[in-house]
Image (cartoon, grey):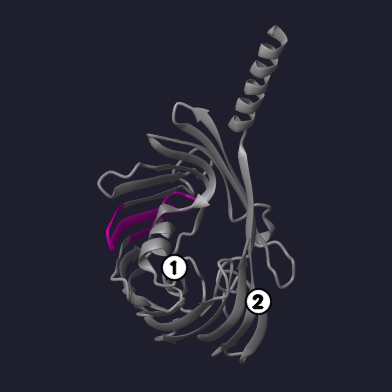
Amino acid sequence: MNKSLLTLALTALVSASALAQSKVTVYGVVDAGLVRESGAPTGAVSNLSSGIASGSRLGFKGKEDLGGGMTAVFLLENGFNADTGAAGQSGLLFGRQAFVGLTGQFGAVTLGRQYSPYYKALRDVGDPFGAVSLAGRAGNLLATNTRTDNMVEYLSPAYAGMRADLAYGAGEMAGDSAKNRSLSGSLGYAGGPLSVQLAYHRTDNATATDATRNALLAANYNAGWITAYLSYAVNKGTGTARSNDLVAGVAIPVGENKVLLSHVRHDDRAAANRDAAQWGIAYLVPLSKRTDIYAAYAAIDNRNGATFKVGNATDKGSGDRAFNLGVRHNF
């Protein structure tokens, strides 16, 4: 009897221990397609490129229940080029993201290389092209402040649809903590069909004598048959650089498919007045829950010597017009 009870107790302990172990998920995206770029002084070029709609990646994410409503989380995400097999993000092992943190009723605190709150506001709320990076994305003309190294981020719980996202990126320069420092944050509301976020990002230069600053108000409204997007950014660069940017567009479901349309304007407020405007269109066709094909086209009208280019996640672009056609698989 005692042996049976001991066996049952050990079995229960082993089962509880197994449940408490970290749950690790392996995931990724493989994205490749044809890119035709024109408008460059050197002439048109056709490429087989990677990461056209979404950056190709291999990731590992996990969590462990620590009890008391607290969970440990981590994410490691490697970027690669599907067309050549080479590492992305300048060869970094986990160049897309690499962080660890804790979540609970207090919200979430994470530490490492992460997406900035400013970038997430533009990606999730302000750009009809969203997480995709096809020709036509707002990032061809707007500052995106995509990733920050050495970042500590706090994401609050949602209260009545409101949520705050605050981040500090350490410059790690001796003698002055402001050198190379990044500050980023957003305050957002999501309720029913409406999403709105106000975001700010600042990066100090290597001597802490100047800084770039970007403020963004982003919103979208989902009416079911159409989702409308509108964003406005006010930017201060180093020196006398100034600009205001506007993003307007729609996402329209067509059965299971989707049409994306966007217009982006860059209003240069510096003396050079190098303005630019972009029109973009994309068509996404899901073949399954994990696989889709896509086509996109965008053109930029550069003025007064502006040199903006149409690019994507891995191809920074060589001209002011681009056509994309490719396939994306998520696993």
Residue name at image x 46 percent, y 59 percent: 145
> Is residue 254 among the parts visible in the rendering?
yes
**Residue 213 inside the magenta-drawn segment:** yes
Residue 225 pos. (x, y %): 32, 76
Q: What residue sits 55% from the left and 67% below the top?
A: 289
Question: Which quadrant is home to the N terminus?
Answer: top right
In the image, which disc is placed on residue 130? 1
Q: Dot 2, crowdedness within 10 Å: few (<14), some or many (≥20)?
A: many
Amino acid type of the residue that numbered disc 1 sits on in the rendered structure: Gly
Question: What is the residue that sits farthest to the top in this orientation?
Answer: 2
Residue indicated by mark 2: 49
Q: Which mark is residue 100?
A: none
- Under circle 1, the secondary element is loop
Compared with 237, 77 (above or below) is: above
State the count of labels. Answer: 2
Secondary structure mainly formed by the magenta segment: strand
Rendered residue at 48%/81% (across/down):
283
The crowding category of the residue bearing disc 1, from other C-alpha atoms within 10 Å (few below 14, some 14 to 19, many at least 20), is some
Position of residue 178 in the picture relative to residue 75 (left or right): left
Q: Quadrant of residue 249?
A: bottom left
Q: Is residue 12 above or below residue 327?
A: above
Q: Is residue 309 visible?
A: no
Inspect the image, locate mark 2, and give the three-letter code of the amino acid beneath it: Ser
- For the point 72% across and 10% down, the residue is 3
Q: Is residue 144 magenta?
A: no
Q: Position of residue 244 (x, y in %)?
A: 31, 71
Residue 17 in the image: state x and y as whole percent.
63, 26
Could you give the CA–CA distance between mark 2 and mark 1, rounded to whole angstroms? 20 Å
Pinpoint residue 157: horizontal percent, then vertical percent. Answer: 35, 41
Q: Nearer the viewer, mark 2 or mark 1?
A: 1
Magenta range: 188-215
